[in-house]
Image (cartoon, rainbow, N blue to C red):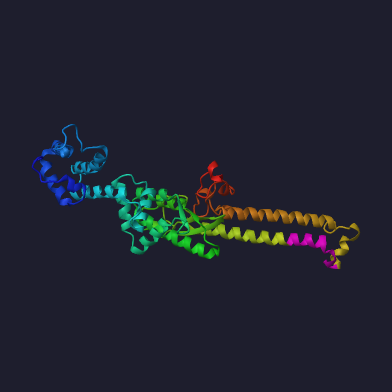
Amino acid sequence: DSLSVDFQFSQFLQAENVPANLEVVKDKMKPHGDEGFAFFCFRIFAQMCGKLGTKTLVGSAFMTEPQFQRFRPGLDALQNLKTSEASTAYNAFLLFQGSKALSRFASPEHHAMARLLCLGSASDHTSGDAIRQAFDDLVPSDKAALTRWLIADGITSKPGYVLCSAPDVIRAAQENPAVGLTPALSMMVRVQERCDVASSMLLRPPTRKVYVHLKELASWAQDAGPSPDEFRQANMNVRSEDLGDTRVFTVQVVRPKRSGNSKNKGNHGGSSSCCCMIFEYFLMFILFLATAACGGLAAVLKWYPDEIPDKYMDYLDDGETFLGLTQTQTMQGSAAASAVFMLLFLLIWCRRRCGECCCPGGCCEDCCTCRSCCSCCQGGCFSCWREGACGYSRLESDFI
């Protein structure tokens, strides 16, 4: 059978034939087991080596190194017939041969799929097929939106999106049976929509690069369940800031409330996040008023003492005191109080900008596990600036 099977290997290398030709080979060789496949491949190799035998019998004039590199993918495809279907082996051969000759992506979706496979660390057909199937299962509008997001390069198509922790999102979604890859990709489309809305509200010129922090989404993909619908029920907020020509979006996940025990013990729902936010803004408002009042009093005592009503100035004349303080002491005390209030205002503002939660009065029982309102618990406020836009420490080359 190895010698009589009707199969033209040169036609296979040039893709003249179809998977049905490989099906004939598979059916003929299957009864002979591995030895039959090995002998058939040897027969093909020997036949190709002797292709120029009419010209010289010294060695193999045909099987040079370039010819062998062209010959080998076809031989590998024949060997794959032992464990794969004929169509699978044929398509794998076409993909490999085509990838060597392509200098650009065949379509935007091809480009997006290539980046998605890299984000998912796909290194074999099994993991690659899972990501491809999840991408194919998206509705057309989501697929088009995700494609635009993935192929934006920041040069010809601005901005380009640096997807920090996206590999963690994909890995967590794959490992969690209650989530899956397709819902994870759908959530990334929702993130894109919120980033677009946030960018349109900033009223600033577009930047070349946008860093999108997906750490909380990766954590949620890991913790969601056991209900398959719970992952999609989470709400997302996007906090933005500009660092030079780079824009940073931090995705904050507000997890749905759960009844009973759950895997996510640190989930406090949206009420805790709202409590923290309202308290902080109220405190910032009070500090702002106190800063303005004390600063205004100090300025009036310094430059406009004549504007103070006489009934108050009578106490301050001739060195007499008002509430135990002279005019100079009152001015200095007001200025100092204004500076203290301003410092407190800036500290709370900084914490808010860095995504931390002050957790006053037990608003959050454990601030560093309340992911809906905290993101920089361990590093402190200024750690967001010491580290790079994606949370990585800057290398020396970054400053060159």
Query: 392 or 113, which lies in front?
Result: 113
Segment tinted magenta in the rendering: 293-309
Could you say where residue 15 lies in the image, as x and y percent from the top left? 21, 50
Question: Would you say residue 85 is visible in this rendering?
Answer: no
Q: Residue furthest top?
A: 58
Q: Residue furthest right?
A: 318
Could you say where residue 147 lies in the image, as x and y percent from the top left? 38, 58
Q: Quadrant of the N terminus?
A: top left
Question: Would you say residue 12 is visible in this rendering?
Answer: yes
The tally of labels here is 0
Location of residue 392 with respect to 275 vertically, above or below: above
Query: 300 or 83, which lies in front?
Result: 83
Q: Quadrant of the C terminus?
A: top right
User: At 47% across and 61% down in the image, what residue appears?
Assistant: 194
* Image-based side of 378 in relation to 113, left or right: right
Q: Main secondary structure of the magenta part?
A: helix
Does residue 168 show up magenta in the picture? no
User: At 82% across and 64% down in the image, what residue appears?
Assistant: 304
User: At 31% across and 58% down in the image, what residue appears?
Assistant: 137
* Image-based side of 309 in relation to 187, left or right: right
Image quarter of residue 44? top left
Location of residue 141 with respect to 218 vertically, above or below: below
Could you say where residue 186 lies in the image, as x and y percent from the top left? 38, 58
Q: Residue furthest front?
A: 55
* Image-based side of 389 in relation to 85, left or right: right
Could you say where residue 161 lies in the image, as x and y percent from the top left? 46, 55
